[in-house]
Image (cartoon, rainbow, N blue to C red):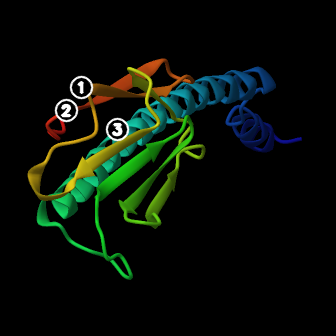
Amino acid sequence: MKKDTVHKYLSYRNCAYTLIELLVGISIISIVFSVGFASYRDFSRRQALSGVTKALISDLRLIQQKALAGEKIGSCTTLDGYKINISSASYSLYADCASDILLKTVDLTANEVALTTSPVTSSITFKVLGQGTNLTSEVIITMTNSKINKQSTVTVGKGGDVK
């Protein structure tokens, strides 16, 4: 071989990466991706909990306003109020008439959120025309995402105020 040909061959050979360099690079990229994915998953769960809290407050204020206005729905002739039925994984909104009229059901299992109330109650009724609620003391609704150990609370007073 000529000297020029050997020199060109060696210069091309020195431009490549070794197997160890490739493995180190892939390892670093994998670690960065893993940390980023875990952070994103926790962020997503915190946002889901925040969204559920805002939706619950919005729904409570909706039925509060409908009760204050005495708004009748469908075949409801005698309206006693609007109520929310709470279970551990969902809540439902009703017009409280002779037979309850379902307005909306919200399932929280997809968001990994559980509901509890303190004191324990399964239903809160907002009475018509500013008569308050059926509560004897304020109720604290706690939403918990056990995957990230975060909670948020909503308080409903016996007068009907939502905080």
Q: Which residue occupies the foreground of this view, 28 or 114? A: 114
Q: Earlier in the sequence, mark 2 or mark 3?
A: 3
Quick one: SS at disc 1? loop
Height in image: 142 above or below 48? Answer: above
Q: What kind of residue is marked 2? A: Lys
* Front label number (1 vs 3): 1
Please provide percent x and percent y for residue 38. Answer: 55, 28
Q: Residue at x 57, y 40 (%)?
A: 89
Height in image: 34 above or below 65? Answer: above
Q: Which residue occupies the foreground of this view, 144 or 129? A: 129
Q: Tell me the distance, in whole angstroms, between the alpha carbons under discs 2 and 1.
A: 5 Å
Left or right, 62 with reference to 116: left
Left or right, 102 with reference to 33: left
| Label 3, residues with CA under 10 Å away: few <14, some 14-19, many ≥20 | some
| Residue, disc 1 | 138
Q: Residue at x 73, y 42 (%)?
A: 8
Q: Quadrant of residue 47?
A: top left
**Disc 2 and disc 1 in contact, CB within 8 angstroms:** yes
Q: Tell me the distance, in whole angstroms, between the alpha carbons under discs 2 and 3.
A: 24 Å
Left or right, 54 with reference to 130: right
Quick one: SS at disc 3? helix
Q: Earlier in the sequence, mark 1 or mark 3?
A: 3
| Residue, disc 2 | 158
Q: Which residue occupies the foreground of this view, 105 or 80? A: 80
